[in-house]
Image (cartoon, rainbow, N blue to C red):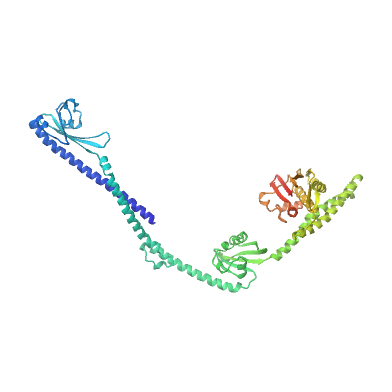
Amino acid sequence: MAAKIFRSTIFVALIVLLCSVGVILGVVYDYFDTMQAERLRDELRLAASGVEELGLTYLEGTDPGRYRLTWVDSAGRVLYDTQADQTAMENHLDREEILQALREGSGSAVRYSATLTEKTVYEALLLRDGSVLRLSESSATTATLLLGMLQPICVILFIALVLSGLLSHRMAKRIVAPLNSLDLEHPLQNDAYEELSPMLDRLSRQHLQIDSQLKTLRWKTEEFQHITRNMREGLVLLDGSGLVLSINPAAQELFRAGDFAIGKDFLALEGAVEARDAVNRAYLEGAGEQLLQREGRSYRLSAERITDQGDQLGAVVLTQDVTEQLQAQRTRQEFSANVSHELKTPLQSIMGSAELLEQGMVKPEDTPRFAGLIRREAERLLHLVQDIINLSQLDEGAPMPREQVDMLQVLRETAAGLASAAEEKKVTLEVTGEDCVVSAVPRLLGEIVFNLMDNAIRYNVPGGSVTASCRREGAGAVLTVSDTGIGIPPEHQQRVYQRFYRVDKSHSRASGGTGLGLAIVKHAAEVQGAKITLESESGKGTTVTVTFP
């Protein structure tokens, strides 16, 4: 504001000064211009009297000084000129002032130089004998005068601007000072401009209203705290705007808040997205529930809207520690998922081969092969049970022995075990690559290969294909399993390794998946120091690469 006042004052002072200079210059110049014309006419009348009495003798004996006298006859021929040879001068009948004098008895004219820096004023008078006597004088134009006065004008302008700046700065400070010194905490105690009184009155009323509301809020909070202090559950009471009215000690500990939270926005106090969603849903839909994780423990957060005769008064947020309950539930789910996922496929292979033998659909020469398949799958079944135990031990950090394993042979054996499943899904299963001997835990390597190929078959499309390959890479080896299946959307690709996570639950149930396969693959790869990467696109298939050091 002070800057605006300062600029406005300087601008007004500058405009006034320039206008004043222009007006004064115009008036003074016009005055002297009029005086010059009057003086020329007076001088001309005197000279005309002398010429009429004495003729050329008068002109030759006269010293006109800065004036120029010219005597022209009625035909325009120059009879005499005080500054030039009349015989060499051209006819003057076309001169404006001469023509006017011949017509009207007197004439006037003003002519400017080519540079417009000088003008000549002419006055002509008709004599009794019909000739014309002309008197002229040269003077500076307005532009010349302005240029001559430019220096003093600039000095005056500078002085005026400096004085205006000092005065306007002082005036702006004096105007703004009362505004800067306003006491907004006590609006009615200010001695300010009368125009500010309505605003200060409104501020005072608002202060009184806020103080009253805060007192009411504190009284209700203290009353409610006596009731909720000894609750094991966390309890937070919010008003209609989401401000905390009460928060008991259990909730303070959970949300890392103290008594300072009273009167604060709960959504600003609690940064968890789950808590925000539950509270927002409570205000919008009437109730909301989410699961929160805090320092390794799980809490169920329930929020419900409080209304009175259709008016929304606020919301109540209740938190309960459900860690043990969820842990028991996860344990049951993990057990069921492991049994379902790890045992179902070998059992199906055994049952399928046994059924073919039972119904006599196997040629006598193929019987040993089917019997061997049954035996291998039964052994796999035993190994899988042991692997579940081993993976549980791995979670506890138990060491597992490593051996030199031919990865290509593992691929071929696994493909043979899954051939019937691939045929049932109408999926082509192919194994390619070179002999790759790696140092690995045989059973865990088998689990990696089996789960990757099993998933590639399960989540494929009829007529699709699965390609499993291995190759050497320096001192290590690379295992790749590619399929032409349904693929994994980008938003799910970072979570597919989580245990029991399913991208499409309905499809997983239809295909027999449990969401544990890739979790086992990742765990087994990490134990052996291998790196796993996944590339997938919805509808175009998936490629999983495991790099062994």
Which residue sits at x=45%, y=68%? Answer: 208
Which residue sits at x=62%, y=64%? Answer: 303
**In the rendered image, which quarter contains the N terminus?**
bottom left
Name the outermost residue toward the left.
53
Q: Residue 132: x and y, percent? A: 14, 30
Q: Residue 222: x and y, percent? A: 56, 73
Q: Is residue 172 above or below residue 17?
A: below
Q: Is residue 1 left or right of residue 285?
A: left
Q: Nearer the viewer, residue 490 or 58?
A: 58
Q: Nearer the viewer, residue 251 or 73?
A: 73
Name the outermost residue toward the right.
364
Q: Is residue 86 left or right of residue 215?
A: left
Which residue sits at x=17%, y=25%? Answer: 87
Q: Is residue 90 above or below residue 335?
A: above
Query: Which quadrant of the structure image shows residue 302?
Result: bottom right
Q: Residue 276: x and y, percent? A: 60, 60
Query: In this view of the protein, can residue 535 be seen by the observer?
Result: yes
Q: Residue 361: x and y, percent? A: 89, 46
Query: In this view of the protein, can residue 55 be seen by the observer?
Result: no
How many callouts does the rendering have? 0
